[in-house]
Amino acid sequence: MSDINGKKLYVTSAKTDADGKYAFKNLLPGTYTVAIAKSAIKGKMPTKNGAGLDSALLLNQEETVDGVDYCLTDTFKVAANGTLQKNLGLDSQYNYLRFDHLPNLNFGRINLIFPESKTLTNQSGDNQVVVDDQRSAHPEFNDYYVPYQILMGLSVFQDGQNAVGLQQAQLDLRERDSATPIQLQPGQDTILYQQPVDSYTSKTFNFDDSAGNSLIKMLVPVPSSLNTIKPTQYTATLKYTIKNAP
């Protein structure tokens, strides 16, 4: 609310319920602005519809009060005994990030009798990971995005009867023009990518060389009591996760 000189006056505060709704009750008639602490909405942005902003929250309108930066709505008037509803919806940046393509891995077959470790190469011809970063289409929200990480996790290998095998196998993925592979063992997670600050563009990971030869390998140690290998087909899941960077 503003005084006669236009200076904003603090009136009251509210917290959301489990559904994200909140209300200011018993307000005097007048002109008001709703403010949300900027620190609370990092990685979020106002909801949008096809025609433009759907939320009344304007991230490009800010004010600092007692050292805290706030994002503001436009002003709106409250009449005596009146009720006014406003959408101050916020969208997670996760809704603007997606995997556009993930590789299908197939390492073929091996003879069960081999005296030393074997290195198998992905035979599917599919060696790309593509992340579609749609945040770049909304530069007005740049100050509210946060860098993200991509995590990779490899499950254990199992056969059709859910028996575990290949316990000591290792998956190596090396990007084109990189000398250092990303290494994963069953049951392990690792970071595939840490996005730089202020770099809101889509990202493609090419795990093959310039001639199209796969740089996705699996190292299979010889069978042992610690590394079960039977005449069966083993499968595992490679899980990719996008999360806000710490």
Image (cartoon, rainbow, N blue to C red):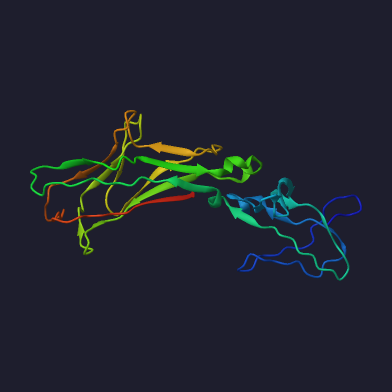
In this view, which residue lies farthest toward the right? Answer: 4
38 left or right of 224 in image? right
How many labels were placed on the picture? Answer: 0
Point 54% across, 37% down: residue: 199
Q: Is residue 246 visible?
A: no
Give residue 41's position: percent from left, percent from top: 62, 52
Q: Closer to the camera, 29 or 102? A: 102
Query: Is 212 drawn above or below residue 223 in the view shown?
Result: above
Give residue 50's position: percent from left, percent from top: 66, 51
Point 74% across, 61% down: residue: 86
Q: Closer to the camera, 51 or 217? A: 51
171 left or right of 90 in image? left
196 left or right of 138 in image? left
Q: Closer to the camera, 24 or 233? A: 233
Q: Closer to the camera, 91 or 2? A: 91
114 left or right of 146 in image? left
Query: Is 223 drawn above or below residue 19 in the view shown?
Result: above
**On-image quarter of the N terminus:** bottom right
Q: Is residue 198 visible?
A: yes
Point 50% across, 39% down: residue: 202
Give residue 241's position: percent from left, percent from top: 43, 51
